[in-house]
Amino acid sequence: MKIKYVRHSGFILEDSACSLVIDCCGLTQESAEVKAYSGKRLYILASHEHGDHYDPKILTFGGDQRKWILSEDIRKRIRKPQDINYIAKGEEYRDECVTIKAYGSTDEGVSFYIEAGGLKIFHAGDLNNWHWNEEETAEDAAKNEKAFLDELKLIAKEIPALDVAMFPVDPRLGKDYMRGAEQFLDSIKVNLFIPMHFWHKTKAVLAFKPVAESRGCRFAEIRKEGDVFEV
C-alpha cells in the first residue's frame, strides 16, 4: 500500500483494489490527487466537521465506485440528500474491500480503524491528549488526559497491534506536545507511525522520530506535502 501525505491530517491510501481519501482539505474532483485514483473503488472519509479535517468539496467527488464514510457530526452540515454513510463511535462500515470502525475522539467526531489491503490502519482524527498544560488548570489537564487514556485503553484492548498509525504530534500543545503520541505507542504496537496535525512545523515533528523508534516502530519523516510512504 502507498500512503500519500496531502497536508495537515489529510492522506490518500492506495492499494491494487481501492483508494481511501481521509481528512483531505483543498482537493477537488479535478485534482491530480483524485484523478490518479480513478478507475477503482474510492472511499472518502472525514473524521469530524472542523474545517481542517472536513471540506465540503469532497461531496463533489463523482464516479460509480465512490463511497462516503463521514462522522455523524457532519450530517447537520449536509443540506442536499446524498448517498452518505454516517458513522458514530462503535459503528462500522463494511464491504468486500474495506472494514472501517469508528472509535472515539477527545475533541469532535471519531477516529478511524481501517482494514484494507490486508493491513490494520488507524487514523486518529482529533483523538489526542489535548492537555494544554500551559494554558489550563491542573484539574482540567488531568480531566482531559483521563478522557484520552480511557479511550486509548478501549482501543488497545480491541486492537493491540497496527501496521500503520496516523496520529497528532501538535507543537501547539507546548513542551509536552509529544505526550499523547508517546502514550499511544506505549499502549499499541505500531509498525509504521505517521505524524499529523502539526501545522507545517516539520522540524518539531521530526524530533519525535527517536521517541517513535525507541518504541520499536518505523517513523515516517514527513518533510513536505506530497511525500509518499509504502507499507
Image (cartoon, rainbow, N blue to C red):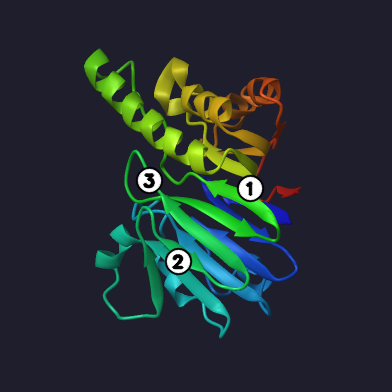
- Whole-number angstrom distance, CA of label 3 to CA of label 1: 27 Å
Q: Label 1 is placed on what type of residue? A: Glu
In the drawing, what numbered circle is on residue 90?
none
Q: Nearer the viewer, mark 2 or mark 1?
A: 2
Q: Label 3 is placed on what type of residue? A: Gly
Whether the residues at callouts 2 and 1 have beta carbons within 8 Å, the answer is no
Left or right of 192? Residue 103 is left
Which residue was labeled with disc 2? 69
Which residue was labeled with disc 1? 225
Q: Nearer the viewer, mark 3 or mark 2?
A: 3
Q: Label 2 is placed on what type of residue? A: Ile
At x 24%, y 22%, the residue is 140
Whether the residues at callouts 3 and 2 have beta carbons within 8 Å, the answer is no
- Whole-number angstrom distance, CA of label 2 to CA of label 1: 24 Å
Vertical arrangement, residue 82 with respect to residue 104, above or below = below
Left or right of 24? Residue 227 is right
Q: Residues within 10 Å of mark 1 (few under 14, many from 20)?
A: some
Vertical arrangement, residue 80 with respect to residue 44, above or below = below
Residue 137 seen: no
Counting from the top left corner in percent of width and height, residue 34 is at 61, 69
At x 46%, y 76%, the residue is 60
The image shows a total of numbered marks equal to 3
Q: Earlier in the sequence, mark 3 or mark 2?
A: 2
Q: Residues within 10 Å of mark 2 (few under 14, many from 20)?
A: some
